[in-house]
Amino acid sequence: MAINTSRFNFRKPDKHDETSELECSIRKRTGFSIRQLQVMVTNDGIIQSGNASSYHAKQLVQETVLEKTSFPIISNDIRVTVISVTKSHL
């Protein structure tokens, strides 16, 4: 599902790219368990999307964003995909 970003007022990147720094912090904190991570910084707040391997990883993304920025999270499109492993797959 694509995020409709046409209604958001995007900021121009500063010398120090906040988005890539935030994505790097998220990846480190979650142990790289978020696939297809995208973080967009707008004047209205943060849009985050990707695929998490657990609800805990999704929560860590939110906590990292709240700790590292003063912007609110305006869209959290991180999906949790839990892969179950059965004995036949071991």
Image: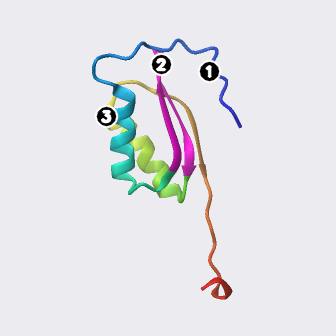
Work out which residue is located at the far front of the displayed protein and give it.
15
Name the residue located 38 percent from the left edge and 17 percent from the top edge: 13
Q: Label 1: state its secondary structure.
A: loop
Q: Most extreme residue toward the left, as rendered?
A: 16
The region drawn magenta spans 35-51
C-alpha span from label 1 to label 3? 22 Å
Asked if disc 3 and disc 2 are in contact, CB closer than 8 Å, the reply is: no
Q: Amino acid at mark 2?
A: Thr
Q: Which residue is mark 1?
A: 5
Residue for badge 2: 42
Magenta: main secondary structure equals strand
In the displayed structure image, the side of residue 81 where residue 66 appears, left or right? left
- Identity, as a three-letter code, of the amino acid under mark 1: Thr
The residue under the point 65% across, 29% down is: 3
- Label 3 sits on what residue type? Lys
Quarter of the image holding residue 16? top left
Tag 2–tag 1 contact (CB < 8 Å): yes
Query: Which quadrant: the C terminus?
Result: bottom right
Quarter of the image for residue 41 reads top left
Q: Are marks 1 and 3 in contact (CB under 8 Å)?
A: no
Residue 67 is left or right of residue 56, and the answer is: left
Quadrant holding the N terminus: top right
- Residue that label 3 marks: 68
Residue 81: in magenta span:
no
Disc 2: CA contacts within 10 A as few (<14), some (14-19) or many (>=20): some
Tell me residue 7's x, y (percent).
63, 14
Distance from Cα at disc 3 to Cα at disc 2: 15 Å
Lower position in the chain sequence, tag 2 or tag 1: 1
Q: Secondary structure at mark 2?
A: loop
